Image (spheres, helix red, strand yellow):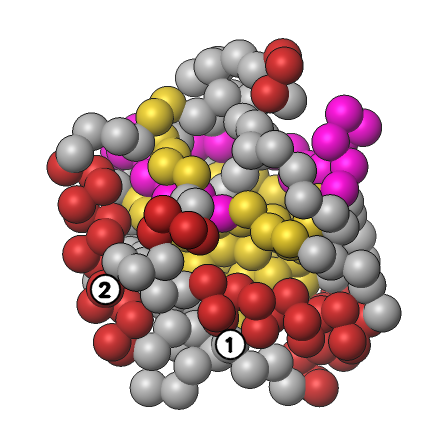
């Protein structure tokens, strides 16, 4: 399996043109194995928390808007059990070099949508927290089938809405300030690693996610 961490010029050009790109087979098989163990250990230990909306100082849990449970990742604490941070930094470096950005940090969490949950249409960037530049999701759902729900519905500015199934090891990158999106009702457990590339370091807060 080839890793999708390396971004080709064609993919970067497409990101600039349409505000999002899809990358298949993002992690290698050995990394996926470690992710599976880490995700299940984290889930079974009960540390996944009901996600909120808003900034850290004004967060609210509103199940009618989003229903996922999350666990914030920490590079120092989690790097030995979850070997993904080098890949994330490669992506950040590539985006900086290709688009002359000033990304200097990132924040990611595990996201789990139980059956019957969703996340209504939103942007990942808002006035109270505007340092998120690029949103990034890697899906972890083996054997996802039509009818399982949980699709990411995106609203590109230059086309009709698009449905993206959350299939295993698929990654989507998109502009946090430009692409409205929602998570449709999931009929079975839906998992991902979700996060943002940031202009500068910022304290972890409960913020929009997919």
Give the x, y percent position of residue 125: 72, 37
Q: Which residue is mark 1?
A: 5
Q: Which residue is mark 2?
A: 34
Q: Is residue 154 above or below residue 82?
A: above
Q: Is residue 112 above or below residue 146?
A: above
Question: Mark 1 to mark 2: distance in Å?
Answer: 17 Å
At mark 2, the secondary structure is helix
The residue lying at 64 percent from left, 66 percent from top is 92
- In the picture, measured across the screen, residue 52 lies left or right of residue 84, that is right
Say whether residue 70 is visible.
yes
Give the x, y percent position of residue 21: 62, 68
User: Which mark's residue is nearer the viewer, 1 or 2?
Assistant: 2
Q: Is residue 111 magenta?
A: yes
The residue lying at 43 percent from left, 73 percent from top is 26
Q: Is residue 124 above or below residue 12?
A: above
- Look at the image and give the residue range highlighted in magenta: 108-131
Q: Looking at the image, which is closer to me, 157 or 176?
A: 176
Quadrant for the N terminus, please. Answer: bottom left
At mark 1, the secondary structure is loop
The residue lying at 61 percent from left, 80 percent from top is 7
- In the picture, measured across the screen, residue 7 lies left or right of residue 16, that is left
Q: Residue furthest front?
A: 76
Give the x, y percent position of residue 183: 48, 40
Q: Is residue 55 above or below residue 142?
A: above
- In the picture, measured across the screen, residue 88 lies left or right of residue 72, that is right
- In the picture, measured across the screen, residue 36 lies left or right of residue 57, that is left
């Amino acid at each position: 399996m080839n890793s999708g961490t390396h971004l080709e010029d064609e993919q970067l050009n497409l990101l600039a043109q349409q505000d999002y790109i899809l990358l298949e087979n993002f992690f290698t098989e050995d990394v996926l194995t470690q992710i599976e163990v880490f995700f299940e250990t984290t889930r079974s230990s009960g540390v996944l928390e009901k996600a909120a909306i808003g900034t850290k100082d004004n967060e609210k849990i509103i199940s009618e808007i989003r229903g996922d449970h999350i666990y914030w990742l920490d590079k120092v604490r989690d790097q030995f059990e979850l070997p993904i941070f080098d890949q994330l930094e490669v992506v950040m470096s590539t985006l900086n070099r290709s688009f002359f950005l000033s990304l200097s940090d990132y924040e990611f969490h595990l996201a789990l949508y139980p059956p019957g949950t969703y996340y209504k249409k939103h942007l990942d960037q808002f006035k109270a927290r505007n340092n998120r530049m690029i949103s990034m999701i890697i899906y972890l759902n083996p054997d996802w089938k039509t009818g399982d729900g949980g699709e990411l519905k995106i609203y590109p500015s230059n086309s009709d809405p698009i449905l993206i199934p959350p299939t295993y090891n698929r990654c989507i990158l998109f502009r946090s300030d430009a692409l409205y999106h929602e998570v449709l009702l999931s009929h079975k457990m839906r998992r991902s690693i979700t996060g943002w590339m940031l202009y500068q370091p910022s304290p972890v807060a409960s913020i929009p996610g997919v």
